[in-house]
Image: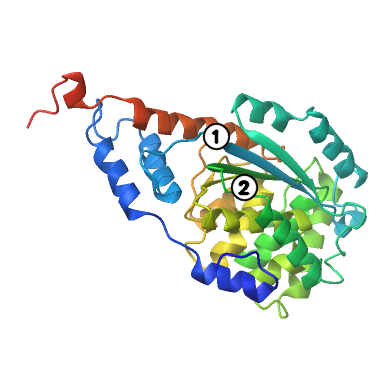
Amino acid sequence: MNAAPESMDDIRKLLDAQPGPSDTARDAARERESTLTKPPGALGRLEEISAWLASWQDRHPPSVNNPHVVVFAGNHGVAARGVSAYPAEVTKQMVANFEAGGAAVNQLSRSAGADFKIYALDLDTPTEDFTQNPAMDEGAFITAFRTGWDAVNADCDLLAIGEMGIANTTSAAAVSHALFGGVAEDWTGPGTGVTGDALSLKAKVVAEAATYHRDTARDAIDILRRLGGREMAAMAGATLSARYKNCPVLLDGYVSGAAAAVLEVRLPGSLDHTLAAHVSAEPGHRRLLDAIGKTALLDLNMRLGEASGAALAINIVKAAAACHKGMASFADAGVSGKSE
């Protein structure tokens, strides 16, 4: 089964049937790695990345020739509660900036040689205030999820996923709190720059939302429908779609991590084809990565969102693939191996 889902139950079935990694490609990568002109393990995580890339691309040697960066934008009804330092209209304004090529992610995508696309998701119709109602009904959720599913091209060999949406760190905090427990303050951070009383209000809203939906959410997928945004549903859709298309994924920051985490909670192992590109300065992100068992590639104190960290990390994955494919073996270079 790999058709775009038409219901939430279809999403659950797709998760249950999702393909695993290629053991053949992974083993070939490990075998070649052991012959290259370096001490075993000397390239650290780059060696792990090349094996990971091969196993999820289902080919050896792995390569990154057609990376894509996709950003999904959505507006949140909870923004009306005053949880963000910026007004909701900034989402639409930033989409125009993306389209004009003026955002940070445009420059980072270009430097990585990656195709860039922005998807605006019904920005004139924010989701519901999730402290009062589910953020989306099933129809709206599936429409957004399918947008993400369809955004993954069959020729993409590495996908970087990100978002834009005023108040979406509030949504990410609420989803994370509902998934992993703790107290709201564990998951709530400054986002676009709220502090003091505004930050306390944000944590209060997160707590209210998680409490309101705790007893009615069917599972992690339903938590995303109730507490997420359209852009978060789309990122979850793109992450799952990429698995079916042999396309490894770089997750960006807190919001994309929370969106993807629902897949992992619903079925452990669902994020094995993903890497955490970076750890955000948003404090809940580090806690979230611990919860889903991910170690970020980069820690640069970034908190911009918009796939900026994921686009930057494309270069690391490219470097891993280039070393793996291009280095000479001990035999080819005439270099003596390790003494017995």
Above or below residue 224? Residue 118 is: above
Give the image location of residue 71, x and y in percent. Answer: 72, 44
Q: Amino acid at mark 2?
A: Asn
Q: Position of residue 44 (x, y in %)?
A: 36, 35
For the C terminus, the image quarter is top left
Determine if residue 57 is in view.
yes
Residue at 49% in and 65% down = 268
Image coordinates of residue 298 in percent, x first then y, are 54, 35
Q: Is residue 183 above or below residue 167?
A: below
Which residue type carries mark 1?
Answer: Ile
Kindly identify the residue that appears in the image at 56 percent across and 36 percent down: 66
* Crowd tier of the residue under label 1, counting other residues whose Cα lies within 10 Å: few below 14, some 14–19, many 20 or above: many
Regarding mark 1 in the picture, which secondary structure is present there?
A: helix
As drawn, the label of residue 161 is none
For the point 53% across and 56% down, which residue is it?
A: 243
On the image, the x and y values in percent for residue 250 come to: 56, 44
Q: Which residue lies under the disc numbered 1? A: 314
Q: Is residue 85 visible?
A: no
Label 2: state its secondary structure: loop
- Above or below residue 115? Residue 163 is below
Proximity of marks 2 and 1: CB atoms separated by less than 8 Å: no
Q: Is residue 26 above or below residue 177?
A: above
Please give the residue where the numbered disc 2 appears in the rendered image.
153
Distance from disc 2 to disc 1, alpha carbons, whole Å, reads 17 Å
